[in-house]
Amino acid sequence: MASQEIETLASALARLPGLGPRSARRAVLWLVKRRETALRQLVAALAEVQARLVECDTCGNVDTQNPCGICADPRRDQRSLCVVEEVADLWALDRAKLFTGRYHVLGGRLSALDGVRPEDLSIGSLIDRASQGGIDEVVLAMNATLEGQTTAHYIAERLEGLPVRITQLAHGLPVGGELDYLDEGTLAQALRARRPVS
Ligand SMILES: [Zn+2]
């Protein structure tokens, strides 16, 4: 029978995405055996995150400052706004260094199955940002899933009538992808998004 402390930590860890109760308990035991190394580092890192990281009131990014580094950077294009589902998507796009504008993190995607409604996401503040003027283009960079595309469609409808150009990421063949290996959805998207040969 595990001690109360181990149970408490294991059940806290089990709430993390991707970790079930079994793997959480294994992680706790692994940490207990490494009190002075891995456990100490984890405690310090968690304390640091709790003390220093905040959510940006403007875009929803997570940073040590609010507004975040991206929102506060005067070199970024203020006229274009890229809408993503999660902070991790923002980071992935920003690592690619192709988009020079600013972001808006929704905090998820619409889902009838999981009961996620428009008011559960930061769609209202997106409409506010787009309505305030000064933004020419809104790029909808949702995931290429049914829920992601439903969300993009819903947002495009809400933005209708505002003087902004609404664009969407193209979905298609991954670079280096061989047709043989692609699933039907990717292949269908690639075919639909076909363009003239230049
Ligand atoms: Zn921000």
Image (cartoon, grey):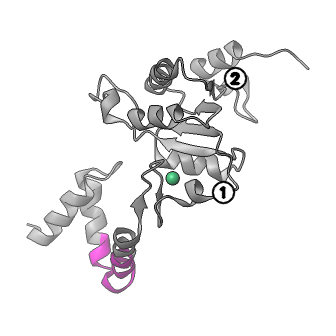
> Is 19 above or below relative to 160?
below
Distance Cα–Cα, label 2 vs label 1: 45 Å
Circle 2 sits on which residue? 180
Secondary structure beneath dot 1 equals: loop
* Mark 2 neighbour class, 10 Å CA radius: few under 14, some 14 to 19, many 20 or more: few
Q: Nearer the viewer, residue 164 or 92?
A: 164
Circle 1 sits on which residue? 74
> Is 28 above or below relative to 192?
below
Q: Is the CB of mark 2 within 8 Å of ligand 1?
A: no
Residue 179 location (% of width, % of height): 72, 23
Secondary structure beneath dot 2 equals: helix
Q: Is residue 159 left or right of residue 177?
A: left
> Magenta segment: does it hold 41?
yes
Residue 165 location (% of width, % of height): 64, 25
Residue 75 location (% of width, % of height): 70, 55
Residue 177 location (% of width, % of height): 72, 32
Amino acid at the residue labelled 1: Pro
State the image quarter where residue 46 is shown.
bottom left
Q: Which residues are magenta?
A: 30-44
> Magenta segment: does it hold 8?
no
Q: Residue at x 33, y 76 (%)?
A: 43
Q: Is residue 135 left or right of residue 67?
A: right
